[in-house]
Amino acid sequence: MTVTQVNRFALALIAVSAAWPMALQAEEMSDSATLIRVTEGHRQQGSTEVLASEPVARLESDPSVSLSRMGGRGLEPVVRGQSQERVDVLLDGIRVEGACPNRMDPPTSRLSAALVPVLEVRTSNRTLRWGAIAGGQVVATTADPDFGEDLTTGQVTAGGADNGDGRLVNGSAAVGSDRGWLRLAGGHDEADDYEDGDGNQVRSAYKNTEGRVDAAWRSENGLYLKGLVSRQQERDVKYAGSGMDAPKTDTDIARLELGAPVAGGDWNLLAWQVDVDHVMDNFSLRPTTMKMLTASETRTRGLRLALDQNPDARTNWAVGTDVETNNWDAERFGGPTLDTLTSVLWPDVDRDRFGVFAEGFYRVAPTLQVGAGVRYDRVEMDANSADKTFGSGMMAMAAADNYQALYGTTNTKAVDDNVSGFITGDWRFSSRQSLEVNASRSVRSPGVTERYIASWSMMPGMRWVGNPALDTEKHHKLDIALPGQSNGWRWRPAVWMAQVDDYVLRTRNAELVSVYRNIDARLLGVEAELGWSNGTWRSSSALAAVRGENRDDDKALPQIPPLQFVQTLGWQHLGHQLELEWLVARRQDRVDLASGLDAGTSPGYGVLNLSGSHPLTGYLTLSWAIDNLFDNTWARHVSRANTDPFSPEAVRVNEPGRTLRAALTARW
């Protein structure tokens, strides 16, 4: 049986799910406060979410995560030096793909700003139910409404920012009880171009509107049903780090979950559908003499069935299976009337994936737990319109011609059999100290862009072509950590290594065409966290460093962030909170200029942020933040090269200068 045949069952259930006006939440949580869980054991309070352009911006408080900026929205997380296709994003248990070949809309831009989710960053395989972790997973979980003794609950937030004239209003309202509820949520936020620390205007304006309906019901015997339908509309999004802007992006999500207790655990069935439509051009929001427009779309359908069991106090095990189908299609048009097809960027690419997993954990002794898991994925990919011609006259060609010219292949079909697994152990060898060890193998199939992008131009330096003959990446990782806590203190030093066979490297050939090839790579990292709290005062220090090596060419991997350090000092009393945050990064001079991905070496920086939250009444709270307190001019090493005519001297897209944000939130 082929993957396509297996997926038919999934598509039938997805069609049913789209008709249900019920919404689904991933996990029940009694606390809706923002929390960032990092790398199995780290816990950090999220930075103030007031008027963040998107929720993923809160991850800047984790030094193992760096955010690549292209404009005001679309921040791309880089986890332990790996990003894009190597970082999966799960929204309440479902995988979401972007629809822009240039990644203007990475999956994290789909996170809801109206219902602030809990964010968890996973870097090690301790479960395989959502797939093997190559670089990392960003997991967003939306809390169920907390009714207490009431029948309704909700909140409304309104706020603004001075730099870029940001405006925000959002809210949610739910009715019901813990047995069953219905919730409506939505919001709108927008901003104009902000200024960096030197007063230069950076193309970063955007408008974002979202609305969602979710609901849940649970019977007395534990059977539950949850559902979600949502729509997000982004309009007039500007990008300083791109030659195009995004006047329109629409995302529609439908999700249905069903589960019940069985034997010593429970079973869970999850189905989802995600449709993303994206338009980018170079004339709607900027002047130009040569018009270009790209219309692209992504269609995702998925189904996951899992069985979890706890037969005794020592044993936990789970088995499951999932299927997922994706389709990507993108075409670029040019000419005075935009009637000339100039490139088939994504040539109607299908990806069908079928996976099964099994994992278990056993507590050998009260102080020692071991676990292991294995997963198999069958991935089939093909480009259905690789032979479709674009251009005209003597310049007419197809994506297949590009693959043949650059890689000598005419076969666009790829079939991957991926076997991944992990073993893990957690030993508490004293009352305050533990040892965590995790070893894993993760196999990743190359993404649609890596295998099939076909962006052609009259100028070689603007050409970008994927490689259908790429092999799968094999990540062999080892993590060792020593977490502990005592008398208000907590600490977690860790070291890790990732040996990657057939790492997919994007680079440029002698003609300056962006191409892909497999290499052997190695990544090494050190992380450390030290925290203290006495209930009123708290302090947290966190550091992360990563080194990426291209072992084939004996040089650095591109887009590796420098050593990063985050220091926070907080105070709270009678509901009032203040926090001072210091973000520090060393200069990065280990770069790969030949790849075209690194804009060059980057200087170090140090930035102070101050934030606070104050209850005004029993229902009303004032939140505020002053970002970049001393109005520094700075940019993250991994951010895009700046193509903004307002700031032509900037090497990268600079972060905002000093910005005052404030918001009022009413809760009931």
Image (tube, rainbow, N blue to C red):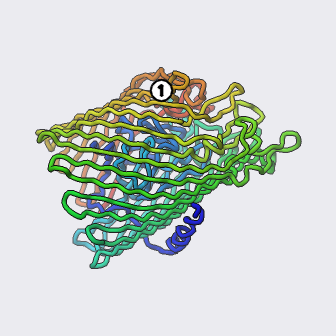
Residue sticking out furthest to the bottom:
220
For the C terminus, the quadrant is bottom left
User: Where residue 646 sits: x, y (%)?
Assistant: 60, 32
Please name the residue shown 19% across and 40% down the image: 434
User: Where residue 202 sits: x, y (%)?
Assistant: 55, 35
Front-lying residue, 204 or 305: 305
Front-lying residue, 39 or 65: 39
State the SS at label 1.
strand
- The answer to whether any part of residue 276 appears in the image is no
The answer to whether 113 appears left or right of 39 in the picture is right
When asked about the image quadrant of residue 216, the answer is bottom left
Is the residue marked by circle 1 packed among few (<14), some (14-19), or many (20+) residues within 10 Å?
A: some
User: Where residue 350 sits: x, y (%)?
Assistant: 63, 55
Please name the residue shown 58% across and 36% down the image: 241
For the N terminus, the quadrant is bottom right
When asked about the image quadrant of residue 219, the answer is bottom left
Give the residue pinned by disc 1. Answer: 549
Mark 1 is on which residue type? Answer: Glu
Please name the residue shown 37% across and 36% down the image: 64
The answer to whether 363 appears left or right of 81 in the picture is left
The answer to whether 206 appears left or right of 131 in the picture is right
